[in-house]
Image (tube, grey):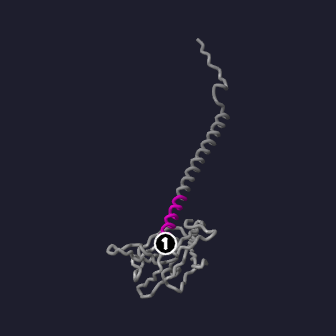
Amino acid sequence: MLIRRPEFSPGNGFTLVEMLVALFVFGLISAAGVTLLRSTADSQILLRTKLGERATLSRLSNLIEADLAQAVGRPVRKEDGTVRPAFEAGDNSLFAFSRIGSAPDSGSIQPSLARITYRLDGAKLVRSANSHADGAREGAEAVLIDGVSQATIRLREPDGGWRDDWAAVDAERLPRAMELLLTTQDGRNYRMLYLVGAGPQRPEKVEGEEDGDA
């Protein structure tokens, strides 16, 4: 008995060209999918980084605002007996001032007087607090933000003018407001405005300026 083999027909399978085209299209779809996933992942990482930076700046701004709101016109005496003004800028620090209510003494109903110092240590903005201002050495330090390339301040006079330094004749004199300009190592700039002290020391809102945050 003879067995007849089925005749080959091009419609029974794919040609080599069709297979190559299919593989090429599949490769394009796969590459597009990988690119989309990579872009999504990079966007999420960038978003988390931005949110983290924003949270750090917000905490920094809130801390400085709380410190300066409690600033008082009280000079302090150093260990060597020299008297330092209530508020000063420069002298190895970005700015330093006397602050009331920072660390109340457990045995007294009166809040203690602290000396707060902000300084730039390399690329780090550092805050130190002396719980007892007179005759006290440098207190515990805390790094508030890293990656800072430049930090400058401007101080507002009672008459509304601004100056870069604070060499007040009266050691009890406080500026009415302070402007802090931060430049990060990646080239971004942040401008923050704060009131100094309370009560009559608070300035009116300056036209064209924004309060507080960066």
Foreground residue, 177 or 158? 158
Residue 53 higher or lower than 205, as above or below: above
Q: Residue furthest bottom?
A: 81
* Magenta segment includes 66: yes
Residue 64 higher or lower than 4, as above or below: below
**Rendering coords of residue 32 (x, y %):** 62, 45
Residue 66 higher or lower than 24, as above or below: below
Neighbours of disc 1 within 10 Å: few (<14), some (14-19), many (20+)? many
Q: Main secondary structure of the magenta part?
A: helix
Name the secondary structure under disc 1. helix
Residue beneath label 1, please?
A: 69
**Rendering coords of residue 213 (x, y %):** 55, 65
**Residue at (66, 25) in percent of width and height:** 11
**Residue at (49, 83) in percent of width and height:** 172
**Residue at (63, 69) in percent of width and height:** 207
Q: Which residues are magenta?
A: 50-69
Q: Residue furthest top?
A: 1
**Rendering coords of residue 79 (x, y %):** 41, 85
Foreground residue, 185 or 136? 136
Residue 69 in view, yes or no: yes
Report the number of numbered marks.
1
Q: Is residue 10 left or right of residue 153?
A: right
* Magenta segment includes 193: no
